[in-house]
């Protein structure tokens, strides 16, 4: 009986973890398809120095021409109580093309996912990383989430300086 309960519990954890990763990957693909519409692209994982444990980096190239379309960072940050997942799409010149909150798990602070607020990051370059926290306006009621995503994007801008692609 105990062994049966442990088996059911282990299978449940496996299925929940797998579906969560598949759900996140589906959201990533949706954002990339919208960002690079009318292009068939390839997403390849990149090895990057100084990345956090929840962070993944990908190079995006056009399938037929092998032209560099940009670089993507998928990361998570912790708001007030729980983590949320987001992605940053960089242009080939390493400026930020777009930022998208993929999964937000808290009841409060979800306003950081608004296009209007995230638009503040667009065009920011690695040269502007040191001043990023001063350049981005916060949102009342979502201060911790705003600070968390801004600091993680700042780290991404610093990391991308050393990527040769």
Image (spheres, rainbow, N blue to C red):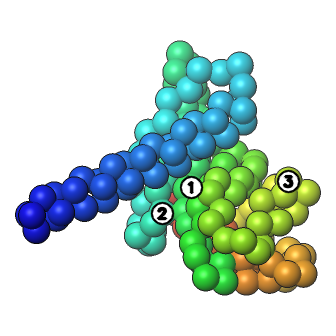
For this orientation, the residue located farthest to the top is: 64
Identify the residue at image location x=66%, y=63%.
104
Q: Is residue 122 visible?
A: yes
Q: Quadrant of the N terminus?
A: bottom left
Q: 115 and 125: which one is in front?
A: 115
Structural distance between the alpha carbons of marks 1 and 3: 18 Å
* Residue 13 image position (x, y, % from top left): 31, 59
Q: 28 and 128: which one is in front?
A: 28
Query: Contact, CB < 8 Å: mark 1 with mark 2?
Result: yes
Work out whether mark 1 precedes mark 2 in sequence or the reverse, and give the earlier one: 2
Work out whether mark 3 precedes mark 2 in sequence or the reverse, and give the earlier one: 2
Please tell me how crowded label 1 is: few (under 14), some (14-19), or many (20+) other residues with Cα within 10 Å: many
Work out whether mark 1 precedes mark 3 in sequence or the reverse, and give the earlier one: 1
* Residue 50 image position (x, y, % from top left): 44, 72
Q: Is residue 130 visible?
A: no
In the picture of the structure, the residue carrying the numbered disc 2 is 55
Please tell me how crowded label 2 is: few (under 14), some (14-19), or many (20+) other residues with Cα within 10 Å: some
Structural distance between the alpha carbons of marks 1 and 2: 7 Å
Identify the residue at image location x=76%, y=74%.
108
Structural distance between the alpha carbons of marks 3 and 2: 22 Å
Q: Residue 82 occupies which quadrant of the picture?
A: bottom right
* Residue 76 image position (x, y, % from top left): 56, 67
**Between tags 3 and 2, which lies in front?**
3
In the picture of the structure, the residue carrying the numbered disc 1 is 73
In the picture of the structure, the residue carrying the numbered disc 3 is 115
Identify the residue at image location x=56%, y=26%.
41
* Residue 55 image position (x, y, % from top left): 48, 63
């Amino acid at each position: 009986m105990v062994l049966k309960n442990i088996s059911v519990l282990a299978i449940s954890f496996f299925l929940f973890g797998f579906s969560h990763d598949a759900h996140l990957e589906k959201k990533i693909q949706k954002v990339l398809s919208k960002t690079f519409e009318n292009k068939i692209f390839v997403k390849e994982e990149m090895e990057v120095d100084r990345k956090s444990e929840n962070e993944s980096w990908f190079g995006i190239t056009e399938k037929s021409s092998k032209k560099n379309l940009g670089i993507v960072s998928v990361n998570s940050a912790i708001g007030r109580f729980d983590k949320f997942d987001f992605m940053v799409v960089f242009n080939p010149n390493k400026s930020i093309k777009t930022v998208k909150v993929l999964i937000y798990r808290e009841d409060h602070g979800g306003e950081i996912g608004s296009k209007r607020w995230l638009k503040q990051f667009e065009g920011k370059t690695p040269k502007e990383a040191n001043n990023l926290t001063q350049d981005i306006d916060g949102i009342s009621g979502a201060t911790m989430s705003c600070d968390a995503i801004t600091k993680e994007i700042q780290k991404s801008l610093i990391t991308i300086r050393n990527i040769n692609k």
